[in-house]
Amino acid sequence: MSKYMENARTAFKKLREKKDVVILAIESSCDETAVSVVKNGREVLSNIVASQIDIHKKFGGVVPEVASRNHVMAISGCYKEALKEAGISENEIDAIAVTYGAGLIGALLVGINFAKTLAYALNLPLIAVSHVHGHISANYLSHPSLKPPFVCLMVSGGHTALLKVNDYTMISLIGSTVDDSVGECFDKVARVLGLSYPGGPNIDRLAKEGQNTIKFNYHEPLKDTFNFSFSGLKTAVVNFVHNSEQAGKEFNKADVAFSFQDIVTDELSEKAVKCTLKENSKTLVVAGGVGANSKLREKLKEKCEKENITVYFPDLKYCTDNAAMIGSMAYYYLKAGMGLADLTLTGKPNVPISIGE
């Protein structure tokens, strides 16, 4: 064992008993370079995000190589800004946390290598955090009184799943998508409608001008399970648009957006509420970027109110990728004695959702 790891293990053990823990967290899994300082898993001292949306818009989606290069250019500045906004020095940091997966390998490695360098230079423990678990933890930042157990609806660009969160680090998978994630589906439908990246927010805005007038020709699968499937609906929307254009038939893009979004949010909200009831829970937590969708929020609030379920959504600033959620989850990893990484840490495109079972 290296001298660094000996010191890291000792410090990690002591931090589990420390009253106040300050974690500097780094997130670079996709196209946001983010650095945050979080105290005790709940108090955000700084939250710096350098977005690449404008860079990737012209490509219609994230280009991995371009994302990686821009992470390299942005990360040092984000780090300095995070310390400045938090009003602390490097000596006041107790641990470094970083997203190690899931995500784009090149993008992940930028954040991981920066985090490893910091941890080694400052002689601090390094905590490797799952991006998915970070999205769950975003709700702890938005709702100070929220505690497990609860059911979680995870809806993002990379994941669509229903989870049972029995404790902060005891998470089990109930159901998930068998093909496309809901965020991916939104982006592909947006592209065929000629909307810019990111597609989800643009479909949400356009749908407000439309009506539910279009019936898409597709088979509705997986009705009696807590799994999801969106590839059939996505293909049906694409075929509708292409066939209409080829036949010279006019159609209202806002109606397409409304009709598509209505189907998706119906399935998500109905299964989430049914799952919460089946798990004998009265708390539903929504996590991930698609959790910002206004129609999904509207339907979940309505359905949960009828069933006497309390539903929680992250603040909009914590729905999309950020490092504050990683710093929050790192704190709970730490308290559970999990996540301590050595300097061989690398990125992973996919990581297990379930932990502590």
Image (cartoon, helix red, strand yellow):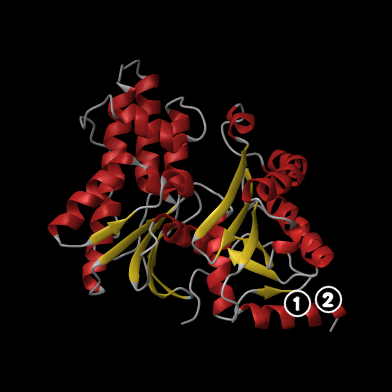
Residue at 30% from the left image edge and 20% from the top image edge: 251
Q: How many marks?
A: 2
Is 90 placed above or below 200 here?
A: below
- The residue tagged with tag 2: helix, strand or loop? helix
Q: CA distance from mark 2 to mark 1?
A: 6 Å
Query: Mark 2 = which residue?
Result: 4
Residue flagged by tag 2: what amino acid is it? Answer: Tyr
Residue at 68% from the left image edge and 41% from the top image edge: 67
Q: Nearer the viewer, residue 82 or 31?
A: 82
Pinpoint residue 253: horizontal percent, then vertical percent: 34, 24
Label annotation for residue 91: none
Pinpoint residue 60: horizontal percent, then vertical percent: 56, 31
Q: Nearer the viewer, residue 19 or 23?
A: 19
Could you tell me if residue 220 is visible in this image?
Answer: no
Circles 2 and 1: CB atoms closer than 8 Å: yes
Pinpoint residue 79: horizontal percent, then vertical percent: 71, 49
Point out the residue furthest to the left here: 306
Image side of residue 117 versus residue 55, left or right = right
- The residue tagged with tag 1: helix, strand or loop? helix
Query: Mark 1 = which residue?
Result: 8
